[in-house]
Amino acid sequence: MVLEINPSLHSDSSHHDHTACTAPIGFTAEEIEQFSWGTRGLFEQIPASGVGYKRYAEYPEKCYGRPEVIQAIKHICVEWEKLCQKPRIGIGNISLSNGGPMPPHSSHQHGLDVDFAPVTNNHEEIGVTWYAEKYSRERTQKLVDLIHNNPILGVKVILFNDPAITGVESWAGHDDHLHVTFLPPGIDSAPFSSDQQGDLRLLIPPMRGERVRQLQEDLANVGISINVDGIFGQQTDAAVRKFQAEQGLQVDGIAGFVTETKLTQLVSGQSRGVSGELSSLTLQDVIEQERAIPFEDLNSGLLLEDRVFCAEIQMVLQANHLLEVVDGIYGPKTQEALRKFKANRHLGGGDVLGATTAKALLDAKPGAGLLPDWQGGDKQATVQAIIKEAHRQGITFQAQIAYIIATVQHETADSFEPVRESYYLGDVEGEKHRKTLRYYPFYGRGYVQLTWVHNYRQYSDLLGLDLVNEPELVMRPDISLFILVHGMKHGVFTSRKLDDYISDNRMDLFNARRIVNHTDQATLIEKYAMDWQAQLG
C-alpha cells in the first residue's frame, strides 16, 4: 500500500528512505538563464561531514551543488551548531556532478536543490517524520529560519509537511525531509509572479497575480466552484481540469491557449468559434465528416482561420516532440511539424489533413492507447491480465512479474480485485476511517493503492483522464491494472522500482517491498513471489 509510514516503525530508524521529489518547482525565465549559464562542470561535492552537519545521502555522487549552494549549506550548519550543537543536521541529495536529470526526481538538476533532515528532540542523528515521537518541531523551525535567513542565497521554496511549521509548503512525499530550493546568485527571493507571458499551471511556489485572478473569475462565471484569490494552487488546478473535462479538452490542468480561448468564448457568451462557424472544428469532426483540409498555404486556409483547431493539432505535435509552442498560430514551424508527423507514419496525400491523418493525430494524443483492454475478472483471469499487461509494458523478466502478482495478492487480500484503503473495516467504518486521512479523498485505491493528490494528478496527465476530480476512476480495472504495472516499473510510488531489486544481477524479494510500502509484510510477500515464480514455471 502507498500509505503514510507508521510513526512507530519509522521514528527510530537510522535509514533516511525519502520519496522522490516530483514537485513542479517553478522558475522564471530570468532564473533559468541565471543558473543555466556556465554551471555545468563547476559543481562541487559537499564533504561527508563538517561543522554542524553530516551527510546522510545514500549515494555520494548525488551530493554535488553550485559552489554558492555548498557555501550556504555550510553557513547554515555552522550557525546551527552555535544554537544547538547536537544533533548535527543531516544533508541528503543535491545534484549529480554535472547537473542534469536525476531520476526519479523532477528537480535536483541544477545544483540548487538540497534535502535536509528534520531535527530530533534529543541528540540522536536518525531519520524521523514530522509526526514521530522523537521529532522536534521547535528545533526544526529554528533550522527553517536559519535556511531562510542565510546571507548567501535567497530561498525559493522549502517543502515540508508539518502544518505547524512556518516558512514551508506542503507536498506529498515530504514527511521525513525538507526539500530546499535555493535561488541562483543575484536573484531576489520575491514571490513567483505569473504576470508574464506563458501558460498558467500548478507550480511550487504557486503562480500568482492578476492573470491567475482573471482565470479564476472566468471559471467561476461559467459555473466552476473556485475561490478567487489570485493564487494558482491545487484548488485552481482541479477547477481547470474540471472545466477541460466538461468541454472535451485535453485534461492537463494547464490554462494554455485552447483552454483560455474556450473559457473566454463562454464567458463572453460567444457560441461561434474563431473561424466564424458555429463552433471550432475538431479532429473528430474531420473523421466523421470525411473532410480534406489543405495546409500547404501559410497565408490562407482553415488552419490559419480556426486557431482553436490549429492549437488542437499543435498540442499533439508538441506531445510527440515535433513542436515547441502551442499558440494557435499556423506558421512554418507548425506546417513542417505536421509534414514530419505524416512522414513518420507513412501517411500519403501530400499537404492535406484528411480523416486518416486526423485519426493518426488522435491516436498520438497523450494517454491514447495506454490503457489495457481489461474489464476485470476472477483470480485466474486477473493473473493472466497482469502477465499480459506486464509484457505490454515491456516487463518480461519472470521474477518481476511474479513479484507484481504477489503484491496484488497481498494488497487485495487474495481477492485480486481493486480495493479501497481500509476496505477490511467494512463500508461504513472504512469510509469513516478514510475521512481521517491527511490525503483524503485521495486515499488508496486499486490493485496497489494509489494515494496523495500528486499521484492522482500524475496519472491524470499521463492517461488524459480527470482523476483529480473523479478519483473513483482509479477503481476501474483497466486503469488500476495500468497503474499497478507502470508504477512498479518506473518507481512512481516510493521512487524505488523493480529493476532496483529484481534483475539478472540481483534477487532481493524482501527489500523489493520498498517499491510500494517500505518493508511492511515484506517476508510474507517474498514467499508469495517465490510461490508464483514456481507456478509460472
Image: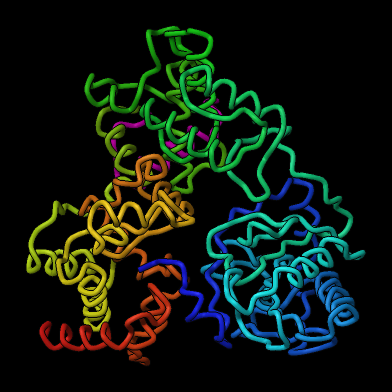
Residue shown at 46%/51% (left/top)? 453
Image quarter where the N terminus lies is bottom left
> In which quarter of the view is residue 525 placed?
bottom left
- Position of 279 with respect to 413 (left or right) is right
Residue that appears at 70% across and 79% down:
121
- Quick check: is 349 in the magenta stretch? yes
Quadrant housing residue 486: bottom left
The percent position of residue 140, horizontal first and vertical second, equals: 73, 70
- Residue nearer the viewer, 526 or 459: 526
Relative height, residue 252 to residue 417 (above, below): above
Q: How many marks?
A: 0
When the figure is inspected, residue 399 is found, relative to residue 2, above or below; the finding is: below
Q: Residue at x 76, y 72 (%)?
A: 139
Residue 78: x, y in percent?
88, 80
**Quarter of the C terminus within the rendering:** bottom left
Rendered location of residue 392, percent (x, y):
23, 63
Q: Nearer the viewer, residue 103 or 364?
A: 103
300 is higher (above) or lower (below) than 98: above
Q: Position of residue 224 (x, y in %)?
A: 47, 25
Please state if 181 lies on the left or on the right of 219 as rendered.
right
Range of magenta residues:
326-351
Residue 480 visible in the picture: yes
**Left-right relation of 289 to 258:** left
Determine if the magenta segment contains residue 242: no
Residue 343 visible within the image: no
**Quadrant of res 504:** bottom left
